Amino acid sequence: MITVKVNNQSHSFAKELSLSELLNHLNIVQKGIAVAVNNAIVTQTAWDDFMLKDGALVLIVKATQGG
């Protein structure tokens, strides 16, 4: 079992999962967002292969319009 923190909320999973799997599990639309894991930006092209480890800190930021 692994636990990851997403925007300061803990989530537990039976096994390691990819960043894409996490976003799907949390029903987060994968457009218009930026994701950092342990304070490092992960490019969208790497989300399928980026495996989250126990204790990972994930920050998801949604783009907004304005000025």
Image (cartoon, rainbow, N blue to C red):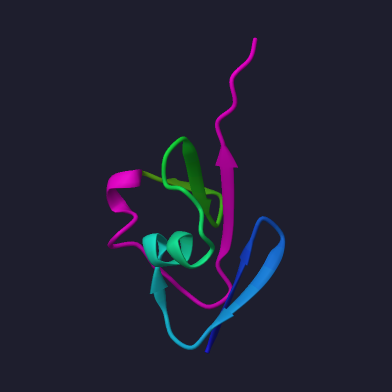
The image shows residue 42 at horizontal and vertical percentages of 41, 48
Q: Does residue 54 sit above or below 63 in this rendering?
A: below
Residue numbers of the magenta segment:
44-67
Viewer-proximal residue, 15 or 55? 15
Taking the spot 57% from the left edge, 48% from the top edge, the residue there is 60
User: Is residue 61 found inside the magenta-colored segment of the image?
Assistant: yes
- 9 vs 28, nearest the viewer: 28
Q: Is residue 23 left or right of residue 7?
A: left
Q: Residue at x 29, y 60 (%)?
A: 48
- Picture layout, residue 40 above or below residue 50: above
Q: Residue furthest top?
A: 67
Question: Could you say which is closer to the camera, residue 37 or residue 26?
Answer: 26
Q: Position of residue 21 (x, y in %)?
A: 39, 67
Quarter of the view holding residue 51: bottom left
The residue under the point 53% across, 78% down is 54
Q: Is residue 1 rendered to the left or right of residue 30?
A: right
